[in-house]
Amino acid sequence: MSQQGESVKFTPPYVPYKTLETYLEELLASGVPPYIDRSTMPTKSGGTQGQLISALKALNLIDRSEGKVNPLLDSLVKSEGEQRKVIWREIIIKAYPFLFSGDDFDLTATTSLRFRKKFEEQNISGSTLQRCLAFFIRAANAADIEMSAYVKDLAKRKRSTNGKSNGKSKQSKSKKQPEKE
């Protein structure tokens, strides 16, 4: 079985970006252990623990088999300001080769549909797809990675069109029709 990095499909992080940021702050406060496992996340639910571990693996911040910490995680946790942006940028570019390698895709000029399609090519769909897109956009913003306006707008639209009413229909439903006599 050959190991070609481009042929291996993976699921990009889909944990809420803020949850990962909070966990990194917790690691800063308590120290980065040599291995990351569920015991380093005692206040998180089981589902959140699994998503965080998957995200750390997908971002190559811990080893995929044992959870051994990559030195880059320690650097990220201890960094701030511009240094943190530089480290995040390195992490994001390495973790998302399907967006950054090759000449057929330009994140700075793409449409939201083409951006979404790149993630779908990783065999991601449904709500997981939406969450992967949201994580990437927020992480890329934290890394000061330039994206097209269409991609940035995708994150804004996600908040208002999540399958539920966006407020407009609530207004129209709340207006009562005058009773006919």
Image (tube, rainbow, N blue to C red):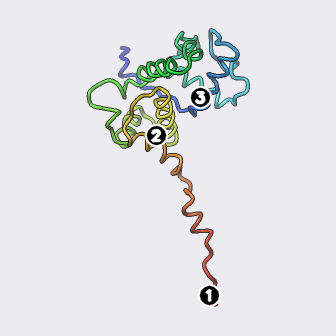
What residue would you read off at disc 2?
Answer: 125
Q: Residue furthest left?
A: 103
Measured as percent of width and height from the top left, residue 133 is found at 47, 37
Numbered tag placed on residue 142 in the rendering: none
Q: Which amino acid does the dot numbered 3 rest on? A: Gln
Instruction: Report the quarter where the N terminus lies.
Output: top left
Q: Nearer the viewer, residue 108 or 36?
A: 108
Q: Is residue 50 left or right of residue 147?
A: right
What residue would you read off at disc 1?
Answer: 180
Q: Which amino acid does the dot numbered 1 rest on? A: Lys
What residue would you read off at disc 3?
Answer: 51
The residue drawn where x is 46% and y is 19% is 86
Q: Is residue 147 left or right of residue 163?
A: left
Measured as percent of width and height from the top left, residue 37 is found at 64, 17
Q: Secondary structure at mark 2?
A: loop
Measured as percent of width and height from the top left, residue 66 is found at 58, 12
Mark 2–mark 1 Cα distance, whole angstroms, equals 48 Å
Q: First in sequence, mark 3 or 2: give its number.
A: 3
Q: Quadrant of residue 27?
A: top right
Mark 3–mark 2 Cα distance, whole angstroms, equals 16 Å
| Total numbered badges shown on the rendered structure | 3
